[in-house]
Image: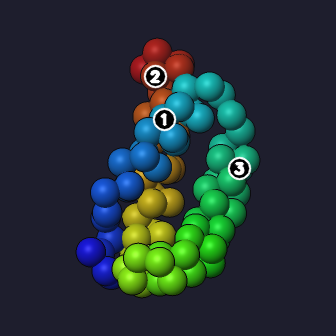
Amino acid sequence: MKGAALDKWSWIHLGTGAVAGYAGIDKKTVFWAGLVYEGIEYYFFNWHAQAFEGSGRESYPNILADMVLLWAGYEIGFKMRRGK
């Protein structure tokens, strides 16, 4: 849905964050990788979606929600790694 904070792909950000946290990847690396990915997704994939699917740009609320879910997943995975 155009403009929605969550979409069918949002859970992937949570899972990716959890795997990264569990693997012990540096928190800053995960944050910046997520931000770079969101930028690529916004500029490249949105162009593709508009040109070929007519679905329009990804919304800023969705980008924010994806980053929050990535971060939450990271914290969950990191705590699982530490056994808490």
Q: Is residue 25 above or below residue 47?
A: above
Query: In terms of secondary structure, where does tag 3 sit?
Result: helix
Q: Residue furthest top?
A: 83
Residue 18 shows which numbered tag?
Answer: 1
Q: Amino acid at mark 2?
A: Met
Q: Determine which of the numbered discs, if any, sits on residue 28 in the image.
A: 3
Q: Is residue 14 left or right of residue 19?
A: left
Tell me whether the residue at label 1 lies in contact with that at label 3, contact meaning CB atoms closer than 8 angstroms. Answer: no
Q: Quadrant of the N terminus?
A: bottom left
Identify the mark nearer the N-term, 3 or 2.
3
Which residue is at the front of the view, 31 or 5? 5
Determine contact: label 2, label 1, CB under 8 Å: yes
Which amino acid, mark 1?
Answer: Ala
Q: Is residue 7 above or below residue 80?
A: below
Picture residue at 51% right of the left edge, 83% below the top: 51
Q: Is residue 64 left or right of residue 8?
A: right
Q: Position of residue 38 (x, y in %)?
A: 58, 66
Relative to 43, is 16 above or below? above
Which disc, if any, is residue 53?
none
Say which residue appears at 63% left-offset and 60% top-offset.
37
- Which of the two discs, 2 and 1, labels the residue nearer the N terminus? 1
- Percent position of residue 14, x then y: 42, 45
Q: In the image, 3: left or right of 58?
A: left
Q: Position of residue 84 (x, y in %)?
A: 43, 20
Query: Disc 2 designates what residue?
Result: 80
